Structure formats: structure tokens, C-alpha cells
Image (tube, rainbow, N blue to C red):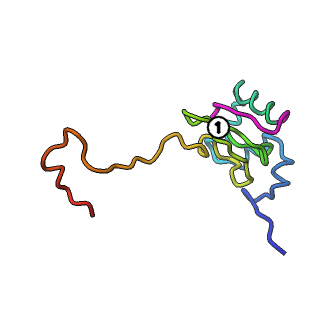
Amino acid sequence: MAEELKIYGKTEEQLKNMNLDEFAELMPSRIRRSLKRGLTDQQKRLLLKLRKKGSAKTHVRDMIIIPEMIGKVVGIFNGKEFMNVEIKALMVGHYLGEFAMSRRRTLHSAPGLGATRSSKFVPLK
């Protein structure tokens, strides 16, 4: 029989049955402090949408993923478009913004216009 996945020493069902204060006690200090201060109006609106529909689009990248959100689909804005992310148990305790990258990897090719003579002859590996 497969061993059940444990997150912060708790099973997924135990996490879902916890209230927000109990959950905050398991988290690292930064997240615990943020949850202790309470959710912002935008974060509360997002939670209400998720409870009602099961999915929502949001610009709130600083929302901490709580156990109540497991299994829901959230469209997270990355500055250009909404990226749909399904919340999984291992994402609990992280920020939404961590799962919608806002920067792309830059791919540099040859030296461009205005490059100096010496930089044009840099060997490529």
C-alpha cells in the first residue's frame, strides 16, 4: 500500500480540516505573520470566488495558498496573460505568484548593432 503524502507533517485531509489559525502555526515566520495580520480585501474576494465557482482569474500574486484552495484552478496574471494553475497539495504555503513566471529566459544570439570590434570575436564555447 502506498504511503500517504505528508505536507508539514500532516495529510491532505488533516490540512483541509484545519482552520486558518491552526494552519498558520505550521508555516514559516513570514507566512505566519502575513496570515496573522489577516487577508486583504482582494484576497478575500478571490477566496469567495473560488468557493463559489471553483476557479477564478486574479492579479493577486501575493496570496498565500491555503489548504482550502487545493483542487481549484486559478488564472494568475503574469503581466501579459493569465496562466491557469491547478492548485495541488504540495503548493500549500507558497505564494500564487511563484507559479506564474513574469519573466522569460533571455536568449542572446550574435552581437548586435553598435557592438565593438573586440566583442564581435568572442568565441562561442
Q: Seen in the image, is 103 located left or right of residue 56?
A: left
Where residue 80 sits: x, y (%)? 55, 33
- For disc 1, the marked residue is 76
Please name the residue shown 70% across and 36% down the image.
35
The percent position of residue 22, horizontal first and vertical second, equals 79, 45
Please provide percent x and percent y for residue 8: 72, 56
Name the outermost residue toward the bottom. Answer: 1
- The structure residue drawn at horizontal position 81% and vertical position 30%, both measured from the top left corner, is 48
Q: Is residue 124 above or below residue 24?
A: below
Residue 52 located within the stretch drawn in magenta: yes
Give residue 11's quadrant in the image. Answer: bottom right
Q: Residue at x 67, y 32 (%)?
A: 58
Mark 1 neighbour class, 10 Å CA radius: few under 14, some 14 to 19, many 20 or more = many
- Where, by quadrant of the figure, is residue 83 drawn? top right
In the image, 88 versus 115, the foreground residue is 115
Q: Quadrant of the N terminus?
A: bottom right
Q: Is residue 93 found left or right of 13 in the rendered image?
A: left
Nearest to the observer: residue 66 or residue 37: 66
Image: magenta residue range = 51-62
Residue farthest top in this picture: 41
In this rendering, position of residue 56 left or right of residue 119 = right
Q: Which amino acid, by three-letter code, is at mark 1?
A: Ile
Q: Which of 69 and 37 lies nearest the eye of the viewer? A: 69
Q: Residue at x 72, y 50 (%)?
A: 26
In which quadrant of the rendered view does residue 79 lie?
Answer: top right
**On-image quarter of the C terminus:** bottom left
| Residue 84 belongs to magenta span | no
Image spot of residue 51 (x, y percent): 84, 36
